[in-house]
Amino acid sequence: DIQMTQSPSSLSASVGDRVTITCRASQGIRNDLGWYQQKPGKAPKRLIYAASSLQSGVPSTFSGSGSGTEFTLTISSLQPEDFATYFCLQHNSYPLTFGQGTKVEIK
Amino acid sequence: EVQLVESGGNLVQPGGSLRVSCVVSGFIFSNQYMDWVRQAPGKGLEWIGRIRNKVNSYTTEYAASVKGRFTISRDDAKNSLYLQMNSLKTEDTAVYYCARLGGWIGATDAFDVWGQGTMVTVSS
């Protein structure tokens, strides 16, 4: 199985801050990775697909990069509605696996 | 409007069985691969399994944690997805989401949608 190691597990930031979240795959997954945002009591919503493509309707303050084993989600200027938990998901091989999640909290 | 609506979540005793359902609308269900994902209270997301479409013989994939106990099926005529859960354990307690996860078509597969989830509690 491919392990997805996500870091940090949580972070505190202020509105306007730049935030970076990382996922490392235990083996190469090309760009078969998505990033999701989840708010309490809600289903996850995908922000980024194919590692760096922005989902329709998602603000351009979100961006993704990486390929192979190292991937990054960047929020260039944190907005109040961005405080949430973020997960990566690899779909390169079965079983599909998620990162452990990063909770972004208000500083 | 795309909608995925799960139902059937309940309280069940350890060792018991339960079937949860998901009714889909707003896209061509029969063409899609469909997934189940769960989330234990206060925990992260866990992919449970996938069922392919008719063209791919409705074959399935499962996570090791549920293989042999859970079965995914579908009824394309009813736009419905099912998860049959047997030999339930307390650690199966979670919100269960049905989803059409993007990516199985290829790198340009941007379509990714989830239901609102249904709660399954396994407890005596």
Image (tube, rainbow, N blue to C red):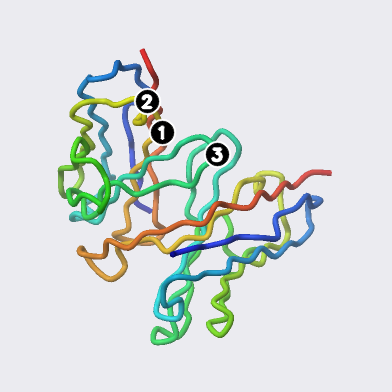
Is residue B108 placed above or below B12 in the rendered structure?
below
Most foreground residue, A84 or B89: A84
**Secondary structure under badge 1?**
strand
Is residue A105 placed above or below A59 in the rendered structure?
above
Quarter where residue A19 is shown: top left
Mark 1 neighbour class, 10 Å CA radius: few under 14, some 14 to 19, many 20 or more: many
In the picture of the structure, the residue carrying the numbered disc 1 is: A85
Residue B98 is situated, as x and y percent measured from the top left of the image, at 52, 60
Work out whether disc 1 and disc 3 sit on a shared chain. Answer: yes
Residue at x 39%, y 21% (from the top left corner): A105
Q: Are marks 2 and 1 in contact (CB under 8 Å)?
A: yes
**Farthest-out residue, right:** B124
Residue A24 is situated, as x and y percent measured from the top left of the image, at 26, 40
First along the sequence among labels 1 and 3 = 3
Relative placement, left or right, of A77 versus B86 is left
Separation of marks 3 and 2 at Cα, in angstroms: 16 Å
**Farthest-out residue, front:** B1
**Secondary structure under badge 3?**
loop
In the picture of the structure, the residue carrying the numbered disc 3 is: A41
Work out whether disc 2 and disc 1 sit on a shared chain. Answer: yes
First along the sequence among labels 3 and 2 = 3
In the picture of the structure, the residue carrying the numbered disc 2 is: A104
First along the sequence among labels 2 and 1 = 1
**Secondary structure under badge 2?**
strand
